[in-house]
Image (cartoon, rainbow, N blue to C red):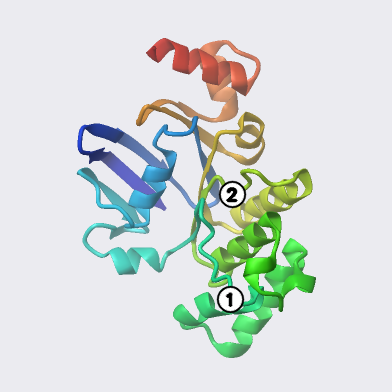
Amino acid sequence: MIRVDGLTKKFATVTAVDHINFSCHQGEVFAFLGPNGAGKTTTIRLILAILTPTEGRITVNGIDVRENPESARRQMGAVLEENGLYDRLTAWENVSFFGELYGMEKNRLRQRIEELFALLGIEEFAYRRAGGLSKGTKQKVAVARALVADPPVLLLDEPTAGLDVLTQKTILSLIKTERDRGKCIIYSTHIMSEAEQASDRIAIIHHGRIRALGTPEELKQKTGKAGLEDVFLEVVREQL
């Protein structure tokens, strides 16, 4: 479980995240929906302890992220906007290296990589260097790396941005599978249809603040709108 209380991040005169509160539970996909610059990526980086909050508290499975960042990180797998793969390593080596960092037993690690590569349809690329892979295949490798140690919490920052439809569907299907396995998943996107399709609850974030939060149906009922795009426009318009 992730719990965020009063989270704020300021960069000089810019407040990127402004006193936000939310929680994400086991077996739940919680989506941050908002335009570029809304605060989605900053929030995920704060949870991962890549950034330090100006104010507020974050706990991951009861671990205070600020006080015990390394312990908290071991609870989480992440896919960030920049995939972070080592171009000179093969797809397999990139994922294996990450599993070794988590202390996975050798045979279990090999079995887990085989499972994930099969699920993601990237077996044929296992021994190709990451630098020569397509954007979609690189993203699948990044997803495999995030999942290899089977962490209870996943943080996915725009994981399908710029990908073809088939790759998007593969990743969204895997997100649902991991949710059904009991994972706590935070997922950021600016794509309305994806948020509605993949998420149990949605936080609409704009200018660093959560403007609305609820299930897709709850958000529609609150605004009287039939579609999530209209919900988003209505919520954002109210803040202008």
**Residue for badge 1:** 88
Quarter-wise, where is residue 136 in the image?
A: bottom right
Depth check: 11 or 4 in front?
11
Quarter-wise, where is residue 230 in the image?
A: top right
- In the picture, which quadrant includes the C terminus? top left
Q: How many marks?
A: 2
Above or below for 222 versus 107: above
Tell me which residue sits at (67%, 81%) in the image: 111
Where is residue 102 shown, x and y percent of the image? 46, 78
Direction from residue 48 to residue 174 in the image, left or right: right
Q: Secondary structure at mark 1?
A: loop
Q: Earlier in the sequence, mark 2 or mark 1?
A: 1
Direction from residue 183 to residue 169 in the image, left or right: right
Above or below for 212 versus 171: above
Q: Amino acid at mark 2?
A: Pro
Where is residue 145 shown, x and y percent of the image? 57, 68
**Residue for badge 2:** 159
Direction from residue 163 to residue 222 in the image, left or right: left
